[in-house]
Amino acid sequence: MSNFRSLPIFFLFVIFGIQNCGTVLLLNALWPSKEDDRIGNIGELFLGTMNVGLIHYWPLDGDANDKVGSMHLTAFGTVGPTLTSDRNNLPGGAFQYDGIDSWHSSDPIVGETILMGTASFTLSAWVKGKFKPSGGGIIMGQGDGLGFQFLDGTTNCFHGIRVYTANGGMGAISNVSPCGIYQDDVWYHLTFTWDLPNNTANLYVGNDIVNSTVYNPNLTPWTSSAPFTLGYGTIGGGAQPVSIDEVRIYNRVVPPIFFSF
């Protein structure tokens, strides 16, 4: 009986990977009795924790609107981004970028940017793409200040993942995963955390930390006020053939276990 009663806890972690308005209703449907009200309470607490400090959220389910902030993204390119299946094989649940002439960008006129290095932050997303030869494009980034990158030859690292920041044209931090272990056309959950009090930048793939770097506390992550982009970046490498889903930005450090299901 004790093993059976532990099953709801397991299913909670599965359900929490789907952050939408129906989650609490689903919990109530699965455990309607007062005896199991604690399950719903745990669920609401877990979801509440996920949302603390969440300043931008793009589910990319049919559009590129920011569901938390006001930094909505606009499609660019001759063809532009196209809808594709997400990591759960749900049609129209993610966007695909061709690596040639398609990307999403925030509006620089709005004046809203992602964090400027004055606090800790977390950036996470699900990505699937091609490791471009001779350099590798930018999965997502902000002007000349921030870039996520698939590596296929840059710095002699093949099939690696990199996130790097710059401040006033100077390199601030570069986190590079182990090389040669990632594959084309496989969904990976990437998380980058900037821990300002501890001067530490961490790169995660899934729930595994693949690179941790202590940085110069005099260098903030970036000073760019350029638009935030998906599928393209100007910091180096240009466009990237990639599919992207569930992009989140927090103004605090958040472990990837909270949103990597």
Image: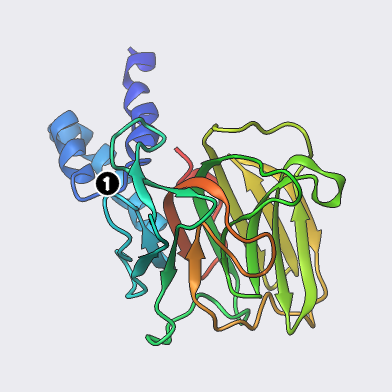
Give the amino acid type for the residue marked by disc 1 in the picture: Asn
Which of the pair 105/87 is nearer the observer? 105
Task: Give the answer, above or below, for where 58 lies relative to 206.
Answer: below
Residue at the top extreme of this rendering: 1
Q: Residue at x 49, y 48 (%)?
A: 98
Point out residue 56 in the picture as x, y percentages from the top left corner.
40, 67
Which image quarter: residue 36? top left
Residue at the front extreme of this rendering: 78
In the image: residue 179, left or right of residue 37: right
Pointer 1: what residue? 41
Other-residue count near label 1 (Cα within 10 Å), few / some / many at <14 / 14–19 / ≥20: few
The quadrant of the image that shows the N terminus is top left
In the image: residue 29, left or right of residue 188: left
Point out residue 135 in the picture as x, y percentages from the top left corner.
74, 52
Point out residue 28 in the picture as x, y percentages from the top left corner.
15, 38
Point out residue 259 in the picture as x, y percentages from the top left corner.
45, 46
The quadrant of the image that shows the C terminus is top left
Task: Give the answer, above or below, for where 53 lies relative to 191.
Answer: below
Q: Residue at x 18, y 29 (%)?
A: 30
In the image: residue 15, left or right of residue 241: left
Which of the pair 247/140 is nearer the observer? 140
Q: Residue at x 34, y 28 (%)?
A: 11
In the image: residue 198, left or right of residue 88: right
Which of the pair 36/17 is nearer the observer? 17
